């Protein structure tokens, strides 16, 4: 399979180069996890409309994974994206799991709905090629631009298994991705994880173009600031950020039942978010707007990947990018000790 170098997409949103790759992506990308029936059952028409709305709004990066609804998110994204010129968008998906249609999905990996196929964790060379082929079939697209090794982190596998999983990923999945990139079947390779430490480790272990980090560089917490992000900048690794709302609390605020890291937020997190929100309120700025705009100030970050389940949510995300935020907000967050003094912040 051969793939032409994707042309820079035309976008009404700001566009940035994705690290050393030839890919250019909108500063807000569409994250497909929610349309895999993550939080509730979603009808096909609404899910597909959300993807189309993202494209119409100027989003040119669409990130998905076999895990998301056990293939349902890829299926729905492909249904929408096949209607648009292929060179007008960039597709990112993941390897590390393939779907077995002969077995029931059982616990559904945390998804409320989705397709009735069991996820098989497999970081082997052959398993990676199988996952890639399945993603092409589910999306119905002629090519995929970015492949990420998914969930090689302690959060997913636990401390006892992480060394084995890391070895499997480098010995198997990484070799398969290197081959696909060399054959120009894909344009860029990387990892998608929830831990800055694992991004750092992969960055030193292989020749990666892109990394997707979820939740570890946000308005609430920035553990990647002094570790992974300088490495990414030095190696010209393009960074996509997921989880900039930390599973919801930076969108809803410190409200009863607010979620952090996919569970109910603990008291310490609630208290810190309440302090951040108080500073935002003093400047008449929505917490969610500040949470979205903050990470894009870092020069290593190319795009923030946001989930949405409806055209209305897409519209809210796009609007949040452009609302003015005074420089005094960032100054006050630093003076309150809620941001590091040397963290990059947006400029008006």
Image (spheres, rainbow, N blue to C red):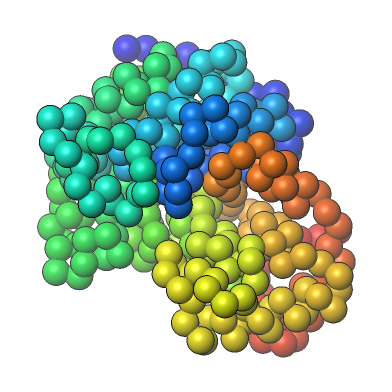
- Residue 141 falls in which quadrant of the image? top left
Judged left or right of residue 14, residue 68 is left
* Image position, residue 74 (x, y; %): 40, 30
* Image position, residue 93 (x, y; %): 39, 35
Quadrant showing the N terminus: top left
Quadrant showing the C terminus: bottom right
- The answer to whether one can see residue 217 in this image is no
Judged left or right of residue 43, residue 121 is left
Q: 137 or 165: nearer the eye? A: 137
- Residue 288 falls in which quadrant of the image? bottom right
Q: 29 or 299: nearer the eye? A: 29
- Residue 186 falls in which quadrant of the image? top left
| Point 39% across, 16% down: residue | 140
Q: 232 or 11: nearer the eye? A: 11
| Point 81% across, 67% down: residue | 285
Is 226 above or below relative to 334?
above
Is 129 above or below relative to 84?
below
| Point 57% across, 59% down: residue | 244
* Image position, residue 46 (x, y; %): 57, 33
| Point 48% across, 45% down: residue | 34
């Amino acid at each position: 399979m051969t793939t032409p170098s994707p042309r820079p997409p035309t976008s009404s949103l700001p566009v940035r180069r994705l690290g050393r790759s030839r890919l250019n992506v909108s500063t807000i990308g569409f994250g497909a996890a929610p349309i895999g029936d993550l939080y509730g059952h979603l009808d096909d028409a609404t899910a597909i409309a959300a993807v189309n709305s993202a494209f119409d709004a100027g989003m040119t990066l669409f990130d998905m994974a076999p895990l998301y609804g056990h293939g349902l998110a890829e299926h729905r994204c492909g249904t929408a994206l096949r209607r648009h010129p292929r060179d007008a968008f960039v597709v990112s998906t993941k390897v590390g799991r393939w779907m077995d249609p002969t077995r029931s999905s059982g616990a559904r990996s945390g998804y409320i709905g989705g397709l009735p196929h069991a996820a098989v964790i497999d970081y082997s060379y052959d398993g990676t090629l199988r996952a890639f082929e399945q993603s092409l079939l589910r999306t119905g697209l002629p090519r995929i631009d970015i492949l990420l090794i998914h969930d090689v982190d302690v959060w997913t596998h636990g401390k006892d298994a992480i060394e084995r999983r890391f070895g499997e990923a480098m010995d198997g999945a990484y070799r398969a991705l290197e081959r696909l990139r060399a054959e120009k079947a894909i344009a860029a390779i990387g990892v998608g994880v929830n831990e800055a430490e694992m991004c750092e480790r992969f960055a030193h272990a292989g020749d990666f173009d892109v990394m997707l980090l979820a939740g570890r560089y946000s308005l609430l917490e920035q553990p990647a600031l002094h570790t992974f992000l300088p490495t990414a900048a030095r190696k010209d690794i393009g960074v996509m950020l997921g989880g900039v709302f930390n599973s919801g609390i930076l969108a809803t605020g410190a409200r009863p039942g607010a979620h952090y890291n996919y569970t109910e937020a603990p008291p310490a997190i609630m208290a810190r978010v309440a302090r951040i929100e108080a500073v935002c309120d003093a400047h008449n700025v929505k917490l969610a707007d500040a949470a979205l705009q903050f990470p894009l100030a870092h020069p290593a970050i190319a795009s923030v990947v946001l989930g949405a389940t409806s055209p209305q949510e897409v519209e809210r995300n796009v609007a949040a990018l452009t609302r003015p935020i005074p420089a005094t907000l960032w100054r006050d967050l630093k003076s309150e000790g809620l941001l590091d003094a040397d963290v990059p912040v947006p400029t008006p």
